């Protein structure tokens, strides 16, 4: 009895590249969100509510998640 099955990856190379790009975009979003601490804990720092931390960073993170989801659902081109 001969088992002639060919082992292949679940995704293509392009899917993995897109997935890594999505993870990099998510990491960039978290880096944009970082910071804004104060030297003195009794003094409030208004930098916590900056445009970068409230609007830009979460938007970049959601775009990264969208790229990751797209990379999972993308079908590789079928070879005939």
Image (spheres, grey):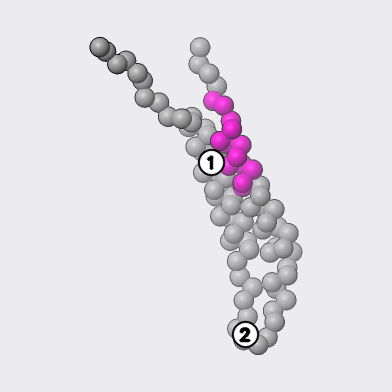
The image position of residue 79, as x and y in percent, is 50, 16
Q: Quadrant of residue 58?
A: bottom right
Q: What's the residue at 59%, 50% (across, down)?
A: 25
71 shown above or below 28: above
On the image, numbered disc 2 is attached to which residue? 41
Q: What's the residue at 67%, 58% (across, down)?
A: 57
On the image, numbered disc 1 is attached to which residue? 19
79 shown above or below 46: above
Asked if the stretch drawn in magenta spans residue 54, the answer is: no
N-terminal label among 1 and 2 = 1
The image position of residue 46, as x and y in percent, is 73, 76
Q: In the image as oriented, which residue stretches furthest toward the front? A: 1
The image position of residue 16, as x and y in percent, is 49, 37
* Element type at mark 1: helix
Q: Is residue 46 left or right of residue 74?
A: right
* Total marks in image: 2
Magenta span: 64-76
- Near mark 1 (Cα within 10 A), the count class, few <14, some 14-19 or many ≥20, is many
Q: Which mark is residue 63?
A: none
* Element type at mark 2: loop
5 shown above or below 31: above
Q: What's the residue at 55%, 50% (across, down)?
A: 24
53 shown above or below 7: below
The image position of residue 59, as x and y in percent, is 69, 53
Q: What's the residue at 56%, 55% (across, down)?
A: 27
Asked if the stretch drawn in magenta spans residue 67, the answer is: yes
């Amino acid at each position: 009895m001969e088992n002639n099955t060919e082992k292949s990856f679940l995704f293509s190379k392009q899917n993995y590249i897109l997935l890594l790009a999505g993870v990099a975009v998510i990491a960039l979003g978290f880096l944009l969100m970082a910071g804004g601490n104060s030297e003195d804990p009794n003094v409030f720092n208004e930098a916590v509510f900056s445009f970068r931390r409230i609007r830009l960073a979460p938007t970049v993170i959601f775009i990264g998640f969208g790229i990751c989801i797209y990379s999972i659902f993308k079908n590789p081109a079928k070879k005939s």
